[in-house]
Image (cartoon, helix red, strand yellow):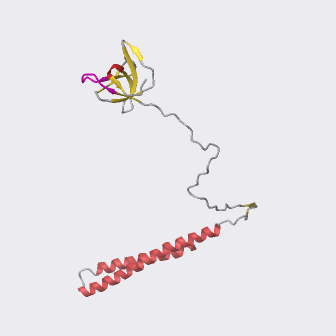
Amino acid sequence: MSGLFIPLAFALGGLLAALVTYRGIRRGGARFYTLEREALLRRATFSLFVSVLLFSAAIGYLIYDRQQVVLETAVEPLEVIEGEATITPTLSLEQFPPTETPTPDNPEPTVTPTPIICRGIVEGTSGNGLTLRDEPGGTELSVLPDGSVLTVLDDEPVDINNLVWRKVRVVGGDEGWVAEQFLTLREPCN
């Protein structure tokens, strides 16, 4: 409790200074002449300054007192507390960001094959568009207008009802099957 007495006294003094300032300003409204009002406002400014100073002192004292408590409770390295030796970690300085260590095991980069992307363009539908289906000859998913660019997937073409069906992916990410006769394939496609 004794640790809180000083900051509470500072805060109470700041509160009283603020109340005196408010009371002085309220009393000095229109009852005084201009010179008296200016003097009253100078006193009010001074008492507000004192109020802020007292509140700041209370907060500063609380912070200072808190740091002293933390320093007093800090454990010394290898100090014995209740029969057990304590070890406090030692601080080490590390480089940030960590530097890369060279790997001499495999100095040459590994070769990864670049996937071949086959593109197709919808053409020859006479403005009717090409139907995207969930399976060859199956349910209609959407209609793709002439000029739509598609990615032809690696799945094998399927021949059903005298039509060759290719699995494609449209720009939005949907996948389905379309009739190959309405696609103009760009090289390299199989």
Residue at position x 60%, y 71% from top?
68
Question: Could you say which is closer to the camera, residue 141 or residue 104?
Answer: 104
Residue at position x 24%, y 83% from top?
31
Residue at position x 29%, y 29% from top?
147
Range covered by the magenta-colored residues: 121-130
Residue 14, position as x, y percentages in the image: 43, 76
> Which quadrant of the view contains residue 21?
bottom left
Residue 81, position as x, y percentages in the image: 72, 63
Quadrant, the C terminus: top left
Residue at position x 65%, y 66% from top?
74
Question: Could you say which is closer to the camera, residue 24 or residue 112?
Answer: 112
Left or right relative to 60: residue 33: left
Q: Is residue 139 magenta?
A: no
Left or right relative to 9: residue 75: right
Q: Is residue 129 magenta?
A: yes
Quadrant, the N terminus: bottom right
Look at the picture and state if 68 lies above or below 136.
below
Look at the picture and state if 174 lies above or below 12.
above
Question: Could you say which is closer to the camera, residue 84 or residue 19?
Answer: 84
Residue 138, position as x, y percentages in the image: 37, 18
> Which quadrant of the view contains residue 26?
bottom left
Which secondary structure dominates the residues rendered in magenta? loop
Query: Residue extending furthest top?
Result: 161
